[in-house]
Amino acid sequence: MGIAGAAWATVIGQVSGAILGLILNAKLNPDVRLNYKGFRVQFDVIRRILSIGIPSIIMASVGSVMTFLMNKILMGFSSTATTVFGVYFKLQSFAFMPIFGMNNALVPILGYNYGARNRERMIQSIKAAMVYAVGIMLLCMAVFQMIPDKLLTLFNASDHMLEIGVPALRRISLSYVFAGICVVAGSVFQALGNGVYSMIVSVARQLLILVPVAWLFSLTGNLGLVWLAFPIAELASIGTSAFFLRKIYRQKIATVK
């Protein structure tokens, strides 16, 4: 069925997952029981949910906009350059998935301990997450630095694609250590109810720094310089993340007794 089949498969998968989730919660989750009797819309609750949800929605959308703009920039060089960028995005998922998984655990831990007024546990959790994130990203960066050609051959890379892709993976992966810290910082912001901070860092990194720097470098006609926009953007976002971390520490964490 081609593209239509892929679309149908996506819809069927999402609907099936939703139905299964409802059934499993109804049958096997005794801690949560939904009762709609006397249900009333509470706009204050909706407002608080959206204050965290809307920044997350924008953050997810920013990635798509950045990818579109980067592809437009890279098309000015060749279709192979955009292919390399697409391959990189598939490969980088393996680097970031462990970090995102860890952050999914970090958010409730921070939230629960903030509610329990356990500052020491909060600080320990943040430090541990930072150390693990940096360690994982260092390992992934080492892989990208040492065997980029092997990674590209997984996608049947041609000689021309290897010529472009090897330096691309090596230069983009220089941003990984900074990226790990920023991702953990974003989870800290969300866990403590400041999702707007995460949104600002994400928008600044991907749209206000990465894309303009990549465009400026593209004017030189040197594709290799374009890939350096990634570590430059991550390095700049470290400063923004550190500023907001300091601010949220004073506002939230330091007040916990």
Image: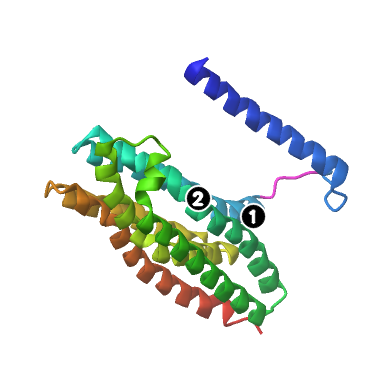
Q: Residue at x 64, y 32 (%)?
A: 14
Q: Marks 2 and 1, Cα distance to the nearest angstrom?
A: 39 Å
Q: Position of residue 182 (x, y in %)?
A: 44, 64
**Residue 78 appears in which quarter of the rendering?**
top left
**Colour scheme of the rendered structure:** rainbow
| The magenta segment | 38-42
Mark 2 or mark 1: name the one nearer the start of the chain: 1
Look at the image and tell me whether residue 55 can be seen.
no
Q: Measured along the vertical axis of the image, is residue 115 above or below residue 12?
A: below
The one nearer the camera, 80 or 118, is 80
Badge 2 crowding class, 10 Å Cα cut-off, few under 14, some 14 to 19, many 20 or more, is few
Look at label 1 and name its amino acid: Asp
In the picture, measured across the screen, residue 98 lies left or right of residue 207, that is: right
- For mark 2, give the secondary structure: helix
**Quarter assignment of residue 142:** bottom left
Q: Which residue is mark 1?
A: 44
- Quadrant of the snapshot with the C terminus: bottom right
Residue 153 in percent (x, y) is at 38, 40
**Location of mark 2 (residue):** 94
Q: Residue at x 70, y 68 (%)?
A: 112
127 relative position to 15: left or right: left
The kind of secondary structure element at disc 1 is helix
